[in-house]
Amino acid sequence: MKRLIPYLILLATVTVTPLAAKAFCGFYVAKADTKLFNKASKVVMVRDGNRTVLTMANDYQGEPKEFAIVVPVPTMLEKDQIHVANPALIDHLDSYTAPRLVEYFDENPCNRRVYKAMSAMSMDAAAPAGAARNEAAKKLGVTIEAEYTVGEYDILILSAKESSGLETWLTDNGYKIPSGASEVLGSYIRQNVKFFVAKVNLEEQSKLGFNFLRPLQIAFESPKFMLPIRLGTVNANGTQDLFVFALTKTGRVESTNYRTVKLPEGMDLPAYVKDDFANFYRDMFSTQVKKEDMQAVFLEYAWDMSWCDPCAADPLSNSELKELGVFWVEDPTPMPVYRKPQSGQPGQVGNAWGGSAIAPVPAAANVYVTRLHVRYDAEHFPEDLMFQETGNRENFQARYVLRHPWQGSDQCPEANSYREELKRRQTKEVETLSTLTGWEVDSIERKMGLHPGTSGAQSNSGSNGSSGDKWWKDLWR
C-alpha cells in the first residue's frame, strides 16, 4: 500500500512515498536559529558566475525507507557532481547567521558616565530492474540518464518528454505523486530540465553507520540563479519555512521576482524578553509575514564571513567553506582571528570561540554570506525563487537589544534625570514590542512590572527606586 509522506522535503522537491514503505557592541545572550520553526528546510547556495553548489537539508523525522525527493535540476549531473555533506556544517552556518539578542546594563548615572543610546545598530522490490526498467521508462517518454549510489543515497537523473509519462513512471516505481503535480512537472519539462531523484539505500546507510539523513549536495553550471520551490508546494499542508544561506564573492543576494525586505532590527526590547526570545522571534516574524501579505523574502543576515559583532558563533573556517562548496577558497588553513575583549579581559588571537566579537582580519575568506527567510505556499509564491548577486556589502543583522535598568539607590541630579528617562524608555519598549509581535500592551506592562501591584521581571523598584516603593511592598498582597 503506497502512502504519501505528509511532509515536504524541500521547497524544490516533491516528497514521494516509496512502496512498502555597522560595528555593533553588546554581549550576545541568545539566538533564534532555524530550530524554532517547524517544517523548515535549509539550502546553502554557493554561487559565482554560472557555477552553483547546492546543499539541501531538511528536518525529516520519519523512517529512512520512506524518504525520497525529486529536485528539478538545469543540467545532467555526473556522479562527481553529487556529494553528501556533514550536517554540522549547516548547523554551524545557521548558528553564525542566526538572529540574535544582546544585552547591556545601565551604569550608575551618579558616576557621571553618559548613557549612550545604542539603538542603531522505501523503496523495496517493486521497481523493475535494469534493461526492463529502462525500456518501460522509454515507452513513457522517460529517460534514465544516469544512476548512482552516493553515500547512503540511491540517485537517478531523469529526463522526460511529458508530465503524464513522468508521473506514471514515478508511480510505477513506488513514488506517489501528489495531486496537482502534473502541471508543475510539465512546466519544468518544457524548460528542458532534468530531475534529480534520491532515496535512501538502507544497506549503505547501515554500512556507513548513520542513523540520520545527511544533506545532499549537487554542483552544476547554469546561467539561472534560482531555487525551484513550486513542486514543494503541491502537497504542502499549510505554509512552510525556507532558509537560504547564499555564499558569494561579491556581496548580498536578493530575490529578483519577490521583494527582499529587511527585518526590523536594532530595537530596544523589555529585558524580560531574554527568557522569551524564541516566542518573541516567532511572533515577530509572523507579524512581518502578515504585514507583507506573505509575498516577501526576508533578510535576516548579510555579512562578510571573516568576522562578526556580536558573534552568535565563530565564522566558518576555510575548510568548512570548502566542504560547503565554496570552490574559490584556496587555503583550507583556519584563519587567525582577533577577538574583542569581553568583561574587561584582554583580546586574544586564536581559533576557539571565546569573545563577544571578532574584528576584521586581513586574511578574509572573500566570502560574503546572505541569510534569507521565506514563508511560502502555492498561493503566495506561484513562481520559483529567482536571485541576483549584488555588489552591496553593507552589513546587516537581525539583532535585538535588552537594556537592564540601573538598580542603584544613589541620589544625585543625574539619577533623577535617569529615572525619568527610564520611564520614557520603558514606555517606548512596550510600544515597540507590541508593534513587532502583536502582543497585548497590558500583558507586556504587567510582565515589566509597570502596573501597580505587579513586580515584573525587570521592575526598577529597588530599595529606593524611581517609585520610591520598597521592593517587598507588594510581596504579600
Image (cartoon, helix red, strand yellow):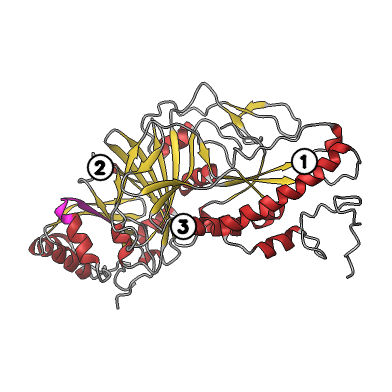
Amino acid identity at mark 1: Asp
The image quadrant that residue 112 belongs to is top right
Residue marked by disc 2: 224
Q: What element carries label 2?
A: loop
Q: Distance between the residues labelled 3 and 1?
A: 34 Å
Nearest to the observer: residue 329 or residue 393: 393
Residue 183 inside the magenta-drawn segment: no
Residue depth check, mark 2 versus mark 3: number of the one nearer the observer: 3
Q: Earlier in the sequence, mark 2 or mark 3?
A: 2
Q: Which residue is drawn at 26% across and 36% down?
A: 50
Is residue 275 toward the left or the right of residue 362 in the image?
right
Any part of residue 26 in sight: yes
* Other-residue count near label 2 (Cα within 10 Å), few / some / many at <14 / 14–19 / ≥20: some
Residue marked by disc 3: 291
Task: Please determine whether, in this image, residue 464 is positioned above or below residue 339.
Answer: below
Residues marked 2 and 3 touching at CB (< 8 Å): no
Q: Where is residue 451 in the image (x, y as percent from the top left)?
A: 77, 62
Q: Quadrant of the N terminus?
A: bottom left
The image quadrant that residue 79 belongs to is top left
Q: Which region shows up in magenta?
A: 189-197
Q: Which of marks 2 and 1 is nearer the N terminus?
A: 1
Nearest to the observer: residue 49 or residue 265: 265
Residue 195 inside the magenta-drawn segment: yes
Q: Residue at x 83, y 65 (%)?
A: 453
Residue marked by disc 1: 106
Q: Position of residue 380 (x, y in %)?
A: 34, 60
Nearest to the observer: residue 32 or residue 84: 32
Q: Distance between the residues labelled 2 and 3?
A: 30 Å
Amino acid identity at mark 3: Lys
Is residue 42 toward the left or the right of residue 462 in the image?
left
